[in-house]
Amino acid sequence: MADLVKLCLRIAYAYGRFTGVINFKIDLKTGQPLVTRRATLISVSTHLLIFALLLYHTLRKSVVTVMWKYANSLHEYVFLVIAGFRVVCVFLALVSRWSQRRTFMELFNSFWRLYQRNPRIIQYCRRSIVSKLFCVTITETLQVIVTLAMMRNRLSIALALRIWAILSLTAIINVIITQYFVATACVRGRYALLNKDLQAIVHESQSLVPNGSGVFVTRCCYLADRLERIAKSQSDLQELIENLSTAYDGEVICLVITYYLNMLGTSYLLFIISKHGSLGNNLPMVITLCGIAYFGFYVFDCWLHAFNVFYLLDAHDKMVKMLNKRTLFQPGLDHRLEMVFESFALNLVRNPLKLKIYGLFEFGRGTSFAVGNSLLTHSLLLIQYDVQNF
């Protein structure tokens, strides 16, 4: 499984370089990120080509104006709006990526050092990483199949370039989201290791019988030293999480909007297919089947992201609960050990782990429920409007 995880990460890195999202080179042997002329040129060329093609094909014949003018169904308006928001969000996300290139290099350095010191973290997040890469591969493959099936009789070099530019937007979104997912999963794995060590310390502390002997004092000092190292590691880890959230603030806002609109559009698309049988005449059944499969994997992808964050927050809460067990220790423990426990617990209370984006919202089960409820409400309103007016 470890080799499979490494393969997935190498593929993700290669895909990031290919789409230009990773605009620097990483030495895969040493893990050292480097700004090179070749990496910069590849990224700049890719991004300029994508947006130049989209801009050229849009403005040459005023495609958006023509499509909006002759749109006669609600789904056509919806998909035009979603496509416009997607282009804008991807553009802003890439602007953030270029303006913070040094920040992302430092972040990668921090995560590489975290892995080097704690290679066992992969054991606690390998299934999530492999599932994520598998889900992304399937959704992008289904998208390519649907696009080629719809354009099978009109393919040309110009149209192929346009399709490539549009699909590249989805690829860029997936690369950015995957990077954030892997980083969060690694932090969760480190929390799991810290909790395992903390649980052993709490268990040993509960079994101590205060007797004032030299062995007892030595044992308490040894446990206090281990606990201080855990507290320092947790503090560094929380600082890393805060740096990660700050670096991804702008990108996450853009990608949350894109994910929300994509989910809304896909659910409405399935309603249109069930209502009319297809979006047009003579479309093969493979489009309908791929559309349903795409929606299923898209929901699964969102589920993976949500629970990846939930498990991280749960790991932090588990640490807090284990520290609260100090009240069950036998009285008369070593003063230093008690002080380290108190200091660690108070520090977690003063600095709770919160994943905030620009201070606008906080990741958590409550936020996810609110987003899901909003998505369901807007989907039903869209369907209701379609039934009444189209």
Image (cartoon, grey):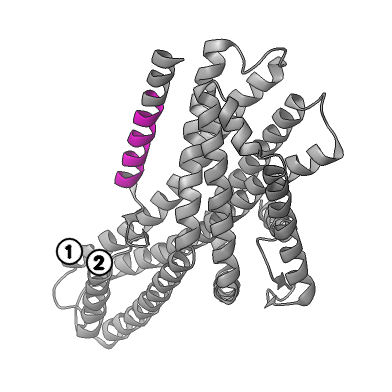
Q: Is residue 22 above or below residue 30?
A: above
Nearest to the observer: residue 67 or residue 195: 67
Image point (73%, 25%), residue name: 150
Any part of residue 315 in sight: yes
Image point (68%, 32%), residue name: 142
Total of numbered circles in the picture? 2
Q: Is residue 323 above or below residue 52?
A: below
Q: Is residue 35 above or below residue 61?
A: below
In the rendered structure, find residue 108 and report the number of the disc placed on it: none
Reading the image, the residue beneath label 2 is: 206
Q: Is residue 195 left or right of residue 213?
A: right
Reading the image, the residue beneath label 1 is: 328
The answer to if 253 sits in the magenta stretch is no
The answer to if 378 sits in the magenta stretch is yes
* SS class, disc 2: helix
Do callouts 1 and 2 mark residues in contact (Cβ within 8 Å)?
Answer: yes
Q: In the rendered structure, which amino acid carries the disc numbered 1? A: Leu
Task: Specify the farthest residue to the bottom.
Answer: 214
* SS class, disc 1: helix
Q: Position of residue 258 (x, y in %)?
A: 51, 45
Q: Position of residue 282 (x, y in %)?
A: 72, 12
Disc 1 crowd, CA 10 A, few/some/many (<14, 14-19, 20+):
few
